[in-house]
Amino acid sequence: MRGETPAEAGERPSAHSSRRATTVAAPEPGDRVRRARKSSNARIVRWAGVLPFFAYTAVFLLFPTVELMVKSFKGSSGQFTWANVSQLFQGDFASAYVTSIEVSAITAVAGGLLGLFIAYAAVHGRLPAFIRPLLSTFSGVAANFAGIPLAFAFIATLGPTGVITSVLNGAGFHIYNHGFSIFSITGLSLTYVYFQFPLMILIISPSLEGLRAEWREAAQNLGATPAQYWRHVGLPILLPALLGATVLLFGNAFSAYATPYALSGGYINLVPVRIGAILSGNVIVPNPQLGDALAFGMIVIVAAAVSVYVLLQRRAAKWLQ
Amino acid sequence: MSEPFHPADEHEAPGISRRELLRYSGFGAAALVSFPSLARLLDASSKSPLAAVTSSLPTSLGSGGLPALIKAAKQEGKLNVIALPPNWANYGQIISTFHAKYGLTVNSAAPNDSSAQENTAIQTLKGQSRGPDVVDVSPAIAVSGVTDGLYAPYKVATWSTIPASMKEPSGLWYGDYYGVISFGTNMNVQKTPPQDWSDLLNARYHAQVAIDGDPRTAGDAFAAVYAASLANGGSLDDIEPGINFFAKLKKAGNFVPADALPANIAKGSTPIAIIWDYLNLANKVQFAGNPAYTVSIPKTGVYGGYYAQAISKYAPNPMAARLWEEFIYSDAGQLLYLAGFTHPARYADMAARNVIPASLAAKLPPASEYKGIQFASLSQIAAASKVITAQWGPKVAGS
Amino acid sequence: MAAVTAARPVRARRRRPSLWALFWLLAGALYFLVPLYSVAQFSLETGAHRYGFHWYAQIFSDPSFRSSFLLSLRLAVETVAISFVLMVPTVYWVHLRLPKLRPTMDMIAVLPFVVPPVALVVGLSGLFSALPSLLASSQILALMYVILALPFTYRSLDAGMRAIDVKTLTEASQSVGSPGWKTLLFVIVPNIRSAMLSAAFLTLAIVMGEYTISSLLLFNTFAVYIYYIGNTEAYQAAALAIISFVLTWGAMMGIFFVSRLAGGRESVQIGGTR
């Protein structure tokens, strides 16, 4: 167990913080003042490290986000109104949120698991060395192979006249007669998983590499079963990255617009597609405030997902000790 | 064996006091709040010189006529256009002809921008030399652009021959071309092309009929529903029968929700495409027999839709913009639209004066098929878009 | 008491690949490649039952193809560079000194998913009016793409930093007197190489595929070209999809080999068996 906390580490003499040595003698009143000043200096230095990041995101991300949230509550002439946000809870928009969450959660878990198994196979499956970079680079491309080409590919593969559909029909298994459709939520999910599982592969591979093979062998030599290995060694190490990656996959699917639109237009009721119709279409007179309100709803949901993730992390950390 | 290391966050240290967190976030919030006011201050100060220039721009050909306009445009030397794909309405040839004739460099960006995105581009690139000079937008967005004050009024020399139903009275926007909703059929997949809307319900068209995306987003998908309404007991004031028709089509299993893109049509995923006639005719030329393709105008429900030109109020090349408008509304320019399988806005006038070459007219379906054409007014479009937003999802969309 | 293992001698590391691993790899390969097959097959159709590379030739001879691809490639490299300079020290710092900041970082890192690109552009209009030179060149795209790639770069780097013992490495380096930046550059970075590679690949893919912002700001990037072809051409669209797949993959292999050259020694192992 680490005996030292990061805060204390920051207070120790190190090359980039104060060069003054920590006093070891009994504390005097002057010492306390000096230590307080030194610790607040150290605090400022500590925060300076993340200042570039916060400055950058403040300008390019946080400020537009705040403006978006403010505009959600404004009417077309700038007056405060609940009208936009209240529409989110009504019939069609509300079910759009439900469907979006549903698809995102399904594909985050399904894509996550598939990606995890494939990544594990590549890292620990004793496969030839060239598999790793090949898998990483293919995953990189596939993770963003979305939009019109992906939709075309899946319609051409699993559509009513697709390649696989025809093969299955020939074998006597008519999937479209049994209720399958590439234009259903199942079909959309299959399409999403195409870019979800490569994303998981890329994110989780470094963590899997951190799971040294010697540990597994050592555990086996000590008589541990695979289950025990995973419970005491594998999962504690993997779980934070795994949970974080799942949240990422959720957000990735949640925000997808080009793929569902190219696949089936507005057929599946998803929030980004509705936002697109309102903000950047050709039919509806643009209503930026309503579009912003819909995006605000998405922010709330994703914030909830992150909160769940943080909670799960803490719970898991306690459980795994 | 040593314990595996634990990530640092499991030992949460008393890192930062709540007071300090509040203080820092207070700074942050203050910065965020002051930023827009600062930006607006700078924005306001940079706006005034532009406003002065705008008010002195001509709203029609002045006493110098076209030669004076050409001279002024050549001094600007370039034109920025957006959302004009080369193979949509023959814009490729229109742009190259304009360039060849007047020597102006034409910068064409964002070929796939939607109409709403065109308006956004005007606002975002206000005061930039890269900003769009002219836009080509759907009527609903043109109205929105007027409300947002994005356009400068201008009446071309041939203004009076543009149909009144296709232009804004003070010259803020004006229709440039129109088309009707047509049926295109991939003959390799479907040997019997549908002739009319009622045909589409036939079982032979199982999982074959598609429109151009979502009618709440895409102009010609919206027009397809409108046309279906006209053919099924509806009217320009009532789009609901069209929505019901597509619900019926879906129930019959004939409707394919996929976007009727050229690739999907040629592949056979969406072998029957209900889209603008000029797009279907361009597809036919593009396919060149691979696959074999038939285009027809439905016998009932002939719905016309137009796009509108507008000059940006913040056009960096205002005289070139006006020259562009004069060019595309001249007979020569309008005939170029015709070569792109669209009906130019001044078609009726030009036909009456016999200036349309027969060979060019023959490339489109005969005029008799367009006889029942109906155009919706702005208020009808606005009302219909509300209905379709409310009803398309529940009635037609999937799960 | 440790069980006595079978009498078979302990062999060198190179054992046969596990069947389980082969199965999953095959599953992955099929999922990748089968949808691509339809696209590839369609892209080779030049007529009724005739095949050839005609459509590929058309794409390659289109000047817009080359200019848009090179523009996006340049932007991708810039975005990766800016991302690394911004994110690697930040994530390192958070891991080392400010672990309580993680939930905030997690939240900020998912925001780019849910803020529509239109809102990002419109929200920055104040900044653009104040500094019009920002919009004049395509550099602004790189700056905004850093934000779009943020979820992926942060998550990759975070996972990478978790997998190594940041504290011990830092202490070890400092105990020999290295200043902070040297620790970061020569001790931490080589150990998160694969995470940085993942981040670079994802960023490259995102930039090559980003459409909305570049279209709104009127820059003709590769994704704008792909969308245009996808909406107006049939066979060329399929050919372009395959071309863009291969080219992007090639660019990533390029990054991989460059990273190999730039110091691909084995990562330092800390916390192994003792």
Image: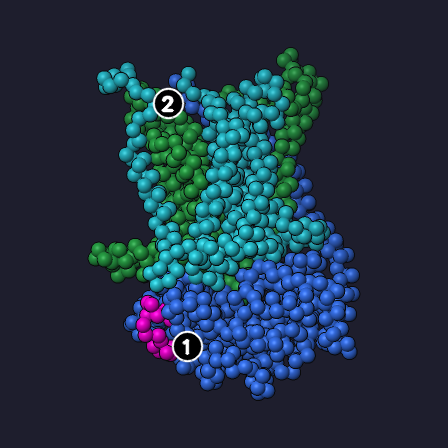
Chain colours: A green, B blue, C cyan
As helix, strand or loop, the secondary structure at mark 1 comes to strand
Is residue B232 rendered to the left or right of residue B356?
left
Residue at 66% x, 50% y: name it. C137
Q: Nearer the viewer, residue C209 or B126?
A: C209
The answer to whether residue A159 is magenta is: no
The part of the image, by quadrant, that contains residue A171 is bottom left
Residue at 63% x, 44% y: name it. A58
- Chain letter belonging to callout 1: B
Callout 1 amino acid: Ser
Residue at 65% x, 16% y: name it. A21
Q: Nearer the viewer, residue C56 or A156?
A: C56
Q: Which residue is mark 2?
A: A214
In the rendered image, is residue A63 in sight? Answer: no
Crowd around label 1: few <14 · some 14–19 · many ≥20 (10 Å): many
Q: Which residue is mark 1?
A: B296
Q: Are marks 1 and 2 in contact (CB under 8 Å)?
A: no
Q: Residue furthest left?
A: A172
As helix, strand or loop, the secondary structure at mark 2 comes to helix
Tell me the magenta residue range: B185-199
Q: Nearer the viewer, residue B385 or A177?
A: A177
Of the 4 image quadrants, the one containing the N terminus of chain C is top left
**Residue C138, image x and y in percent?**
63, 50
- Chain letter belonging to callout 2: A
The answer to whether residue B197 is magenta is: yes
**Residue B289, image x and y in percent?**
39, 68
Q: Which mark is residue A3?
A: none
Disc 1/disc 2 C-alpha distance (Å): 71 Å
Residue at 42% x, 68% y: name it. B288
Compared with residue A150, is residue B286 higher up or lower down, i.e. above or below? Answer: below
